Amino acid sequence: MAEPHQIDQKVRDAYWRETSRFTWLIVILWFISWVGPLVLHSWLNQIVVFGFPLSYWFAGQGSLAFFIVLIVWYAVKMNQLDEKYGLQEEEA
Amino acid sequence: MSWGKIFGIYTGAFILFTILLAFAEYFQLIPNRAIAYTYLVVTIGVYALIGVLSRTARPDEYYVAGRGVPAFFNGMATGADWMSAASFISMAGALYATGYDGLAYVSGWTGGYVLLAVYLAPYLRKFGAYTIPDFLALRYGGNSARVVGLLMAIGASFTYLIAQITGVGIIMGRFLGMDFNVGAFVGLAGILVCSMLGGMRAVTWTQVAQYIILILAYITPVAMLSYQHFGVPLPEFTYGRVLQDITQIETQLGVKKLWVDMAPGGMLNWFALCFCMMVGTAGLPHILMRYYTTPSVKQARASVGWSLFFIFLLYFTAPAYAAFAKWTVLKDVIGKKISELPQWVHRWGDSIDGVAQNKLGLFDIVDQNKDGVLQLTDLVIKSTDFVVLATPEIAGLPYVITGLVMAGGLAAALSTADGLLLTISNALSHDLYYKILSPNASIVKRLTAARLLLVVAAVAGAYVATFRINIIVAVVAYAFALAGSGFFPALVMGIFWKRANKQGAIAGMIAGFMTALVLIVIGRNWGIYPLGVKEIGSGLFGVPVGFIVIWLVSLMYPPPDQKTLDLVESVRYPKGTTLKLAGVD
């Protein structure tokens, strides 16, 4: 079984570059998803959808759902990245 | 039989049991107190049974459940591990009291899982050790990092544990009329039977069982309330209309700060609190530890998603709880004659117009201008916990549902206590005893030590809890600031920055932790708030201090050796085994 440090350095670097970039993307989206509704509070709360003032809805429910989407997206994309670079786990 | 089938049958049996109790109550075969005791005995009995069935003599089973917990069930277990007495009983009440401002907890206690998913969980799984101090020791060369890690793990987990035992004592008191100290020690026994014989393996499957009870108990009452008013048992979607009504009534009453709006100038504190809860989530060892138990990196990634999904089910409902309670109070209580208040007010009130109702009551009704009508200021709330506790009666549901809520609150407190206790005793038995004091100890000796220390930590926790030092939410919130500031920077830098070294990590962990600790102490005792940020959000300063100190101090000392660099490399890629490389069993 090949250990990671025996794999071509170029492959590893490329994988890690792509992983880091994707991690940043997720973290930036995460930050916007909860800070955005907070900063825009007084404006967003005047918009009412199905009775929900929007800033209130985002802070209490909307951003939560978005967090799940981010995590699922991350898991799916990372599994694809593993395969792309041949760095996935060997099945036991 | 598959795990899915077992827990499917278990869920069905629990619902059937609740229905049978409801019939018994309807035909007046069983008094209320007996219903509460039946729930107590049956649920703790089930947890104990799982605990005994999962007993083990193998260290990998004891410490990481043999790394055989599928993503879905690890998600459920993490949900129960995560959602404490504070989440279950107090959070909706905090929202009731503060409206928009309290939502910082809801966002904060869920958003942290994104950080956990991308920065820590898959890498810790790949690393594959037993404890968080294990990671610190291997990454940052030696036992000094381990000692700092284990001290912080114990510090954060112990404060949190006391809060859970306090929660158990309060619940037992309210529903069973038990003395607080007796309640706390009964709860303690419940925790010990689950975790002592089977360690992580037993705690995992008990937590799955506890999750199922707590989520059913949380959603049922408010779903019924929504059904009664709107014909749809989905309070999460119907409470928009409730919010509109609240705003309208508040406007009529001339309330200045509307419930759905932020307190003026509250933005920075909202941000600090939310940030602190998020980073704390990703820095609490009892949560991080759960991701050691999945079979693979892939499953660890999926498991964070399941964890947040199961947590989401409760947190997504909490704002609805608060809104329905607020609405009921504004509509059915405020402006009514004090002689004609609804029944639930008598049931949960302490005194009404000077007449004592219930010695553990959660609010007083004081007719200040003696007009016989209840004004907004006449309702003096002592504990907003009534939001969750009284909802079954507000909805006019039978007492069985109140008993169910008690069982849910207990499940939430016990499951979190289980995880915390295991973190504390593992830090003592694995990191301190085995890795530092007695590296040649046999497996039998190690596991005996683990169990002994588990009992010691549990008794110590219960003993401290009997002093009744603090309210639940405050104590728990401090643990977040401390764990986030102490652990998070060192763990993330350990994976994402190869140049981070021993000196940097130790200095950074101590600096971050101490920054948060000092701010908590001066904020709490003397009301000193830098930039106006309350002590509960002190992680806003502690976390960046942690990162900056690691960075600066690491650059002042030589880079880590080749072995450590290989270790970091190996943690970053799912392929291969890490620990063989590091020469660890």
Image: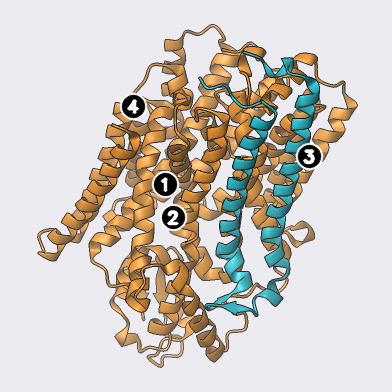
> In orange, which chain?
B
Tell if the residue under mark 2 belongs to the same chain as the one under mark 1. Answer: yes
Please give the name of the residue rendered at 50% of the width and 87% of the height, measured from the top-left corner.
B249
Pointer 2 with pointer 1, Cβ within 8 A: yes
Q: Residue furthest right?
A: B556
Q: Residue at x 66, y 51 (%)?
A: B276
Residue type marked 4: Ser
| Dot 3 or dot 1, earlier in sequence | 1
**Neighbour class for label 2 at 10 Å: few (<14), some, many (≥20)?**
many
Q: Nearer the viewer, mark 2 or mark 4?
A: 4
Identify the residue position indicated by label 1 in the image: B413
Question: Distance between the Cα atoms at labels 4 and 3?
Answer: 41 Å
Q: CA distance from mark 2 to mark 3?
A: 33 Å
Q: Decide which of tag 4 and tag 1 comes sooner along the chain.
A: 4
**Which chain comes out cyan in the rendered image?**
A
Q: Mark 3 against mark 1, which lies toward the viewer?
A: 3
